[in-house]
């Protein structure tokens, strides 16, 4: 069945090529016919113009002067003679022919029309003489002028007719050249068509095989996962629908995969937002107990500071559901957290925050630093004899923000560090046991997900302590709103 379709497609191509060759042969004939019709129309138009002008000659040389003489001799009156109507009719006719005539032959008609104005002025003079009852001799002299002007107009009309005859003769020469050139071109095209026909017939087989091979190659690439692969249009009717369907299939697969990825990201974001809400209640209980102890001890300022720190901590943690906050808010968040924890672990915890104020208005994903600080406290400082210090630092590097949380805790050995890196590479969001926060794995996943970067946290650890750092691109407020509107 496949062979039959393939053979039919080849025959179809051969038929198409034959039609094209026939079309090539017909073109010169059509062009020659069109040119002949154009020249015939020009011939006809020129003859009609010359005939119209020739018909005016009698009116100009005989009828108008005759009517003028009849008026002067008393045989007729201006109102009955219709001399003005005839003059205007001649002027309108000459003006119409002038508009139809080419630039090269217009001058004679333009001058003739202006001379008709002079002839009309002489007729006006005859009318004035009659109205003023002047001697007939004066009007007879004007009639003589009318005849002279009419003769001048007649000569101009003759000149126009001669020019039209000359133009028509030139058109005849041009038509002969066109006919000869068309015949030569037709002969050459026929000869070329006969010589090239065999070449194109042989080439047709290749033109059919090539799109089939392209279709096979593209199908293989699509099967390998290259969904951006698109097949170009083919001239083979049997392959056109198949090509279209393959392209549609690739587009639909791509759309489905994009939708699946988008849904997965949305689900993971929802899971991470849920994790954000799971603040360890023991942290809240212990902080409230500390506030009560301070109040019972009469330490008013300490109570105020702890309460304000706790308020800032939860206000920024919630931040009206927003995922992005300014660096200054993130800084204030960890300051509140460390103040609260230092109250509980005053003897073992010291900290320093080194984030320049000029970074304050830059936006970043919220709750990135607090889990790192929490991890440093619970897994580094708290279980080390004698405690230690946490250093939180931030800086800008070109278009990037660079943050680091370093502690002088117990650190991790190579095996523990490798296990943690493996968990982050897998990216399964979990809450770190005993940490009361999201854990390093979740922070790493949020950075990769929200910033669309390949790597998140970088961890270095030794017996002297652990440093967790990350680098993320700066985000403008407009970019954040755009991303949220797309994902929303």
Image: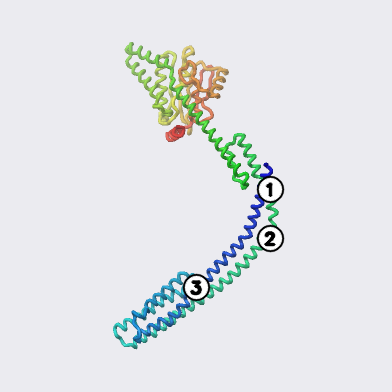
Residue 336 vertical position relative to residue 114 in the rendered view, above or below: above
Upstream in sequence: badge 1 or badge 2: 2
**Element under disc 2:** helix
Q: Residue 466 versus residue 257: which sits nearer the camera?
A: 257
Query: Can you name the residue that lies furthest to the left here?
Result: 132
Viewer can see residue 236: yes
Q: Residues within 10 Å of mark 3 (few under 14, many from 20)?
A: few
Cα separation, mark 3 vs mark 2, equals 42 Å
For disc 3, the marked residue is: 48
Nearest the viewer among 217 and 282 is: 217
Asked where in the image residue 296 lies, by quadrant, the reply is top left
Relative to 223, residue 27 above or below:
below
CA gap between label 1 and label 2 equals 23 Å
Q: Which x, y percent locates residue 171?
A: 56, 71
Which callout, 3 or 2, points at the residue further toward the start of the chain?
A: 3
The reply to whether residue 390 is visible in this rendering is no
Q: Secondary structure at mark 3?
A: helix
Q: Is residue 471 left or right of residue 91?
A: right
Q: Are marks 1 and 2 in contact (CB under 8 Å)?
A: no
Of badges 3 and 2, the one in the foreground is 3
**Is residue 192 rendered to the left or right of residue 430?**
right
- The coloring applied to the image is rainbow
Label 1 Cα crowd, 10 Å radius (few <14 / some 14-19 / many 20+): some
Q: Which mark is residue 191?
A: 2
Tell me residue 229's x, y (percent): 59, 39
In the rendered image, the quadrant that contains the C terminus is top left
Which labelled disc corresponds to residue 205?
Answer: 1
Res. 74 image quadrant: bottom left
In percent of width and height, residue 126 lies at 34, 82
Task: Classify residue 218 as left or right of residue 396.
Answer: right
């Amino acid at each position: 069945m496949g062979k039959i379709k393939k053979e039919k497609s080849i025959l179809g191509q051969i038929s198409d090529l034959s039609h094209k060759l026939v079309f090539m042969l017909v073109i010169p004939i059509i062009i020659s016919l069109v040119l002949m019709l154009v020249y015939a129309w020009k011939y006809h138009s020129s003859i009609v113009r010359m005939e119209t002008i020739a018909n005016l000659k009698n009116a100009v040389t005989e009828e108008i002067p005759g009517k003028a003489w009849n008026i002067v001799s008393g045989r007729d009156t201006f109102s009955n003679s219709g001399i003005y109507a005839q003059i205007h009719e001649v002027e309108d006719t000459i003006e119409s022919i002038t508009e139809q005539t080419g630039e090269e032959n217009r001058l004679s008609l333009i001058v003739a029309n202006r001379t008709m104005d002079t002839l009309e002025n002489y007729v006006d003079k005859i009318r004035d003489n009659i109205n003023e009852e002047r001697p007939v001799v004066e009007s007879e002299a004007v009639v003589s002028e009318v005849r002279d002007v009419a003769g001048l107009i007649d000569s101009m009309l003759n000149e126009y007719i001669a020019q039209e005859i000359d133009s028509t003769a030139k058109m005849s020469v041009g038509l002969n050249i066109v006919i000869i050139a068309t015949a030569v071109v037709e002969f050459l095209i026929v000869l070329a068509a006969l010589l090239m026909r065999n070449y194109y017939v042989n080439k047709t087989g290749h033109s059919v095989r090539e799109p089939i091979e392209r279709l096979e190659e593209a199908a293989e690439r699509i099967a390998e996962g290259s969904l951006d692969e698109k097949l170009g249009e083919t001239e083979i009717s049997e392959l056109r629908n198949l090509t279209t369907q393959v392209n549609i299939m690739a587009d639909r697969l791509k759309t489905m995969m994009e939708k699946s990825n988008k849904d997965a990201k949305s689900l993971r974001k929802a899971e991470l937002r849920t994790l954000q809400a799971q603040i360890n209640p023991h942290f809240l209980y212990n902080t409230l107990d500390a506030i009560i102890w301070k109040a019972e001890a009469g330490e008013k300022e300490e109570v105020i500071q702890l309460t304000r720190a706790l308020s800032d901590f939860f206000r920024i943690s919630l931040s009206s559901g927003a995922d992005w906050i300014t660096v200054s808010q993130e800084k204030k968040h960890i300051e509140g957290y460390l103040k609260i924890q230092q109250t509980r672990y005053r003897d073992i915890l010291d900290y320093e925050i080194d984030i320049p104020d000029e970074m304050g208005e830059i936006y970043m994903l919220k709750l990135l630093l607090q889990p790192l600080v929490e991890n440093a406290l619970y897994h580094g400082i708290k279980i080390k004899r004698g405690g230690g210090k946490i250093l939180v630092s931030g800086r800008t590097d070109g278009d990037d923000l660079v943050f680091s949380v370093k502690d002088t805790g117990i650190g991790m050995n190579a095996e523990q560090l490798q296990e943690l890196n493996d968990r982050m590479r897998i990216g399964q969001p979990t809450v770190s046991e005993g940490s009361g926060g999201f854990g390093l794995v979740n922070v790493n996943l949020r950075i990769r997900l929200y910033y669309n970067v390949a790597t998140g946290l970088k961890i270095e650890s030794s017996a002297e302590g652990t440093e967790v750092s990350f680098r993320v691109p700066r985000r403008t407020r407009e970019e954040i709103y755009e991303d949220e509107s797309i994902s929303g």
